[in-house]
Image (spheres, grey):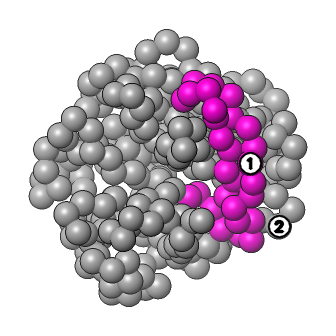
Amino acid sequence: MRRGDIHIRDPFVFTENGKYYLLGTTGGVPWGKESDLTLFVSQDLENFERKCYMVTDGSFSSYVDIWAPELHKYNGSYYLIFSAYRKDKGRGSFIYRSDSLEKSFTALTGEYITPSGWECLDATLFVHENKPYLCFSNEWVAPITNDGDGSLYVCELTDDLTALLGKPKKIISGKYCGFSVEVHHVGKSGYVAEGPFLYEEDGKIVLLWSTFTQNGYAVVKSVSSNGVMGDYNFEKLLYDHDGGHSMSFVDFQGKRNLTFHRPNRAYEERMQYFLLE
């Protein structure tokens, strides 16, 4: 199938052995049981084949809103991170593990890796100087600050990725960043900060994230010059025309790319990607 035939939100590209692996929020609409953790594979980022369903043991069958899966390789194993919701547990992010892309992933602990009771989503793994970190969003509809401030947090992880180490640090505020606009949903109002992704560039830590501006859904670039747990300063809007939830990957020509979904309308979302200067 062609890239444009795949209905996908929150696209994530994992590269290995000359192949591009694509996953994201797939299915019909993301609210409900539609997201199915499908993994696609391609050699050119234009023509894809459906490879497999990444989890087949039914372990998240009681959950809905299966959102924004990511695939990472760490210490020789593959890790799948995705957000989910269940009424008695709220919203949080799981980590699943497999020793091969040919095998189904299984839950690392069976519990959310994000803080209990925080209503979290969009967790991402970042390894820096051999230390693993988790960056995630505290959702704007239920922020722990109770002021409509959807925010991004970062925290060091244990080496086996089973628990957070210490207290998460707020690094981005949707409400007070200076350019987000207020959003409204089911009687609630607030400011969005979601879809984080981290990578290193020129000795600095780059944070990609998304919010809503006057022009619609957007991709933001912020940068820390004092480490993963440091201070992230706004650098630029990379895109603000109704496309967002981005990540970055290096292609097999050694060039860094940005990918995100656009437009941000149900059933119309498609993967887009561009070279980053």
- At which x and y percent is residue 40? 29, 70
Query: Gap between marks 1 and 2, in whole Å?
Result: 18 Å
Q: Amino acid at mark 2?
A: Asn
Instruction: Residue at 53% x, 38% y: name it.
Output: 203
Q: Which residues are magenta?
A: 218-246
Callout 1: helix, strand or loop? strand
Residue 120 lies, with reference to residue 116, above or below; the image says below
Q: Looking at this view, is 17 or 213 the one in front? A: 17
Question: Magenta stretch: residue 161 in it?
Answer: no
Q: Amino acid at mark 1?
A: Glu
Q: Looking at this view, is 109 or 167 the one in front? A: 167
- At which x and y percent is residue 207? 60, 44
Q: Residue furthest front?
A: 202
Instruction: Residue at 67% x, 58% y: name it.
Output: 219
What is the chief secondary structure element of the magenta stretch? strand
First of labels 1, 2 by sequence position:
2
What label sits on residue 215 in the rendered view? 2
Residue 144 lies, with reference to residue 245, above or below; the image says above
Q: Which residue is mark 1?
A: 235
Callout 2: helix, strand or loop? loop
